[in-house]
Amino acid sequence: MTATPTPAAALLEVVDVNRRFGDVAALDDVSLTIAENEFFALLGPSGCGKTTLLRSIAGFEQPDSGAILLGGDDLLGLPPNRRPVNLMFQSYALFPHMTVERNVAYGLQREGLGRAEVRARVDEVLETVGLTALTKRRPRNLSGGQKQRVALARAIVKRPRLLLLDEPLSALDRKVRMEMQLELKRLQHEVGITFVLVTHDQEEALSMADRVAVMADGRVQQVATPVDLYRRPANLFVADFIGSSNRFAGRVDGGVFVSELLGKLPGATDAQQMERAHLVVRPEDIRIFSSTDGGGTLQGRVIDVQFKGGSSHVAVDVAGALTPLLVSVAGTADVDRGDDVALDWSAAVVVSEELA
């Protein structure tokens, strides 16, 4: 597993945590360290273990072994209601018969806080999330984005040391989801609470989190910043899961990548000797030009051009490649379907196909 250095002042430590359901290892020796005031994401496909880990931190799952420490204190001996942790559910779980302000105040009232303190804290958090004008509305009269803000306000009004977010934006349409991604990031900085987000949406994780843990088969495959995950994936799973890529199977011999079907290809010069390796080339790193200009690493024919607004995606059929190569260019492409082209690149990474 490849990891970037963990920031100072660690808040949450997950140490060798295991959780099995029959023959299935939902969590397999999972270890993580999350810093104070960090926005951290757990990313992976369904069944990778990310939700089980989140529920274990919250207290709704009991690991078979390992330790979960918050500020050095063991959480596993505490029931969910005694942990300084809040879990914001995917469904929001708002009380339909209560107004916005009563939904937000409910947890504080259950703690027995005085009326004046409850009012002050509710007013403060509703202003923070931009709901001051909607305090008397009930959930049925709110949009999806407004309901999400109410759930978030209810979670942070109790001032937890750690806020866990379980796919919080999945019920929103794309436009509102993008707006709320920015809002969550802003709020996390403003309220100074450590956020741990669970998501299967790579774009969401990369755009919001300071660091991301990519999970597969109950294990952490890599912990890194979004840029490092994209540019320096630890293995083939991470490379395929994060963003789009072109990959070639082969081996590394004397620092040179040799494709099984295409021969020598430009790759990372510091790659170690590997009998089974994959060269990963991002679409935006490929240079495409007319084959009549000469040069190029590979030659092929354009089979499709898609204009995406700010960029264009070009699919190129290359003899010997198992699938068409994807090239991304800024703006409009200077090639058309049927053109003979050459491809070249300098930026690439060599990875192993082995999971952590």
Image: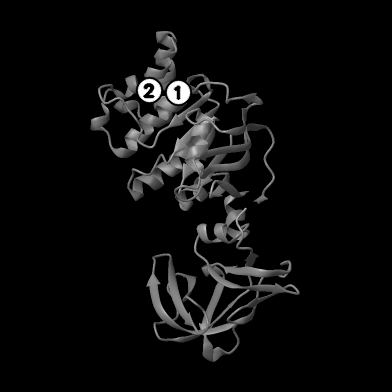
Whichever of callouts 2 and 1 sits on the residue coming sooner in the sequence is 2
Quarter holding residue 344: bottom right
Outermost front residue: 23
Distance of label 2 from label 1 (alpha carbons): 7 Å
Q: Secondary structure at mark 2?
A: helix
- The image position of residue 82, as x and y in percent, is 51, 19
Task: In the rendered view, tell whether residue 149 sits above or below residue 340.
Answer: above
- Which residue is found at the position 73% from the left and 66% from the top? 272
**From this viewpoint, is residue 185 visible?**
no
**From this viewpoint, is residue 5 visible?**
yes
Q: Amino acid at mark 2?
A: Val
Mark 2, Cα crowd under 10 Å, few <14 / some 14-19 / many 20+, is many
Q: Amino acid at mark 1?
A: Val
Q: Secondary structure at mark 1?
A: loop
Mark 1, Cα crowd under 10 Å, few <14 / some 14-19 / many 20+, is many
Outermost bottom residue: 292
Question: Which residue is tagged 1?
Answer: 157
Task: In the rendered view, tell whether residue 235 sits above or below residue 187.
Answer: below
- The image position of residue 170, as x and y in percent, is 37, 44
Q: State yes or no: discs 2 and 1 in contact (Cβ < 8 Å).
A: yes
- Which residue is found at the position 30% from the left and 25% from the top? 95
Q: Is residue 196 left or right of residue 175?
A: right
- The image position of residue 307, as x and y in percent, is 38, 70
- The image position of residue 219, as x and y in percent, is 58, 47
Quarter holding residue 30: top right
Task: In the rendered view, tell whether residue 43 sits above or below residue 116.
Answer: below
- Which residue is found at the position 48% from the left and 72% from the top? 326
- Check residue 104 in the rendering and tell me which mark sits there, or answer none: 2
- Check residue 134 in the rendering and tell me which mark sits there, or answer none: none
Quarter holding residue 125: top left
